[in-house]
Image (cartoon, helix red, strand yellow):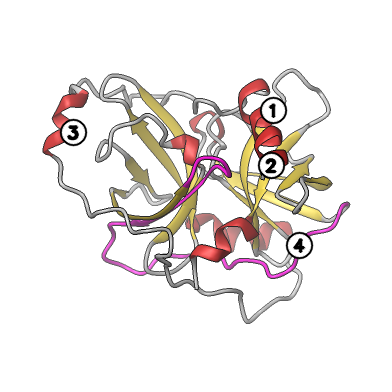
Amino acid sequence: MKNLSAILLCCVVLYGCTQKPAAPTGNRQPMSRPITDNSKRQRPPMPNKSAKSSVPNTTNNRSVKSASEIFEQLSPAVFKIHTSTGYQGFQGSGFFISNDGIAVSNYHVFEGTAVGFEDIILSDGGEYKIKQVYHKDKECDFIIFKVDIDKRVKYIPLAKEIPKVGEKVYTIGSPRGLDNTFSSGEISQIRGDGSEILQISAPIDHGSSGGVLLNSRGEAIGITTSGLDDSGANLNFAINIRLIKPYIH
């Protein structure tokens, strides 16, 4: 995992696309509540590393879809995330991987922020909190959690195959706070000893952290993470979705 750490360090720290996520836009201001108030908030205990969430592994319909079909069918499964330290607010993205509210995002979207101060904002405008965290991994930069929602939600199935260089891909996220932004590109290269990092040409920006990278069958193949701000070559990166699979069943 040392090579993975080095790659992630370059992508997230040096490239600086999403470390930290962009601040909320519009009328949403950073919360003024002191962070010490968070000590009064009771949350479920963090499960041990062997805890797993139950999510579907794939979809029954694996036919190739058009770009417009992918967006229409799957954009409701992607949401915007507002987090806060108690004094300063930040913004990222996430997406559901099961219909009972289990979701994923980047670890760095939540790093250093106050538990209970997060807002999960769905495409229909509904706002929710995180009920439970199943697993978090700073090194690989992902987090698996359950949203505190009492209805079935649209979710994105996980791909079984590792994508290939040249494969068409799509992203949905909230760059700069622009909800459910859709973009497309290709797999430019696959990095890391175990294919942990997917280099993509699809544009992403601040606030895209934690968004979904999709294949042409509408399956999640990655979590969009970072990009090279000063490059005109669309040098962007996503974490291979296979990294979360040991923690789900």
Amino acid identity at mark 2: Leu
Residue for point 78% across, 32% down: 235
N-terminal of the two: label 4 or label 2?
2
Q: Which residue has dot 3 on it?
A: 38
Asked if the residues shown at circle 4 and circle 2 are in contact, with their CB atoms under 8 angstroms apart, the answer is: no
* Residue 160 percent coordinates (x, y): 69, 70
Query: Which residue is denoted by mark 1 in the rendering?
Result: 10
Q: Which mark lies nearer to you, 2 or 1?
A: 2
Question: Disc 3 or disc 2, which is closer to the eye?
Answer: 2
Residues packed near mark 1 inside 10 Å, few (<14), some (14 to 19) or many (20 plus): some
Which amino acid type is marked by label 4? Ile
Q: Position of residue 32 (x, y in %)?
A: 21, 20
Question: Is residue 193 inside the magenta stretch?
Answer: no
C-alpha separation, residue under disc 4 versus residue under disc 1: 23 Å
Q: Badge 4 is on which residue?
A: 162
Q: Look at the image and give the residue range highlighted in magenta.
A: 137-165
Q: Earlier in the sequence, mark 3 or mark 2?
A: 2
Find numbered disc 2 in the image and state the secondary structure of the residue it sits on. Answer: helix
Give, as a three-letter code, the residue at label 1: Cys
Amino acid carrying label 3: it is Asn
Quickly name the residue at label 2.
4
- Horizontal and vertical percent for residue 195? 76, 52
Q: Residue at 25% of width from left, 24% of height from top?
A: 86
Q: How many angstroms separate mark 4 from mark 3 (CA)?
A: 40 Å
